[in-house]
Image (cartoon, grey):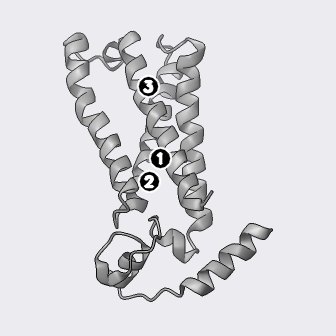
């Protein structure tokens, strides 16, 4: 499994946990925790842009957008925000999200977000991780969104053989 596949699965896990948390928020009447009038109807309307943003970030990452790294950070940031908001509610004594799976979802997005940011920090020095995109057989002149094309648009060169040797040595460890 390549590093890109691991990142894709990690992001998918966090996006899935966030969306399931938003489903769980209807059960717990999250709009009441926030003091938002309008009940579930307003909650549903407010969740449209939230879920759309999460899915847009996931889609951009999967498509190999030049902004893939920022999409990856955005999802992690939303996970931290989810944890912080519910941590505040808990410390403030507000009731809600008290069932084991509800708590697990909140902690899961927190730990998945930590994992995402850890990977970004650790891999920041790697040229392959500078742009999180899949490197396939498309060459820069074919105009794809793969690593070759991204580096070509940025005016950088890429020595595939050298990078493959480096990756092989790393994988052997």
Q: What is the C-alpha distance between the residues marked 3 and 1? A: 16 Å
On the image, numbered disc 1 is attached to which residue?
Answer: 76
Q: In the visual, does 165 lie left or right of 109?
A: right
- Residue at (48% x, 31% y) in the render: 17
User: Measured along the vertical axis of the image, is residue 6 above or below residue 151?
Assistant: above
**Name of the residue lying farthest toward the front:** 137
Which sits in the foreground, 87 or 63?
A: 63
Q: What is the C-alpha distance between the residues marked 1 and 2? A: 7 Å
Residue 52 in which image quadrant = top left
Q: What is the C-alpha distance between the residues marked 3 and 2? A: 19 Å
On the image, numbered disc 2 is attached to which residue?
Answer: 72
Q: Residue 115: percent from the left, percent from the top? A: 60, 48
Q: Residue 120: percent from the left, percent from the top? A: 55, 60
On the image, numbered disc 3 is attached to which residue?
Answer: 20
Could you tell which of marks 3 and 1 lies nearer the N-terminus?
A: 3
Under circle 1, the secondary element is helix
Under circle 2, the secondary element is helix
Q: Quadrant of the C terminus?
A: bottom right
């Amino acid at each position: 499994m390549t590093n890109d596949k691991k990142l894709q699965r990690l992001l998918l896990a966090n996006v899935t946990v966030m969306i399931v948390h938003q489903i769980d928020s209807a059960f717990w009447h999250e709009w009441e925790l926030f003091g938002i009038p309008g009940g579930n109807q307003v909650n549903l309307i407010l969740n449209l842009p939230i879920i759309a943003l999460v899915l847009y970030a996931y889609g951009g990452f999967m498509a190999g957008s030049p902004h893939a790294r920022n999409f990856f950070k955005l999802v992690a940031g939303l996970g931290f925000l989810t944890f912080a908001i519910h941590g505040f509610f808990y410390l403030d004594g507000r009731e809600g999200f008290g069932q084991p799976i509800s708590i697990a979802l909140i902690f899961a997005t927190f730990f998945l977000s930590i994992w995402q940011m850890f990977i970004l920090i650790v891999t920041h020095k790697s040229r392959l991780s500078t742009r999180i995109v899949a490197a396939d057989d498309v060459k820069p002149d074919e105009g794809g969104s793969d690593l070759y094309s991204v580096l070509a648009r940025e005016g950088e060169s890429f020595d595939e053989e050298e990078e493959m040797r480096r990756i092989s040595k790393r994988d052997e460890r």
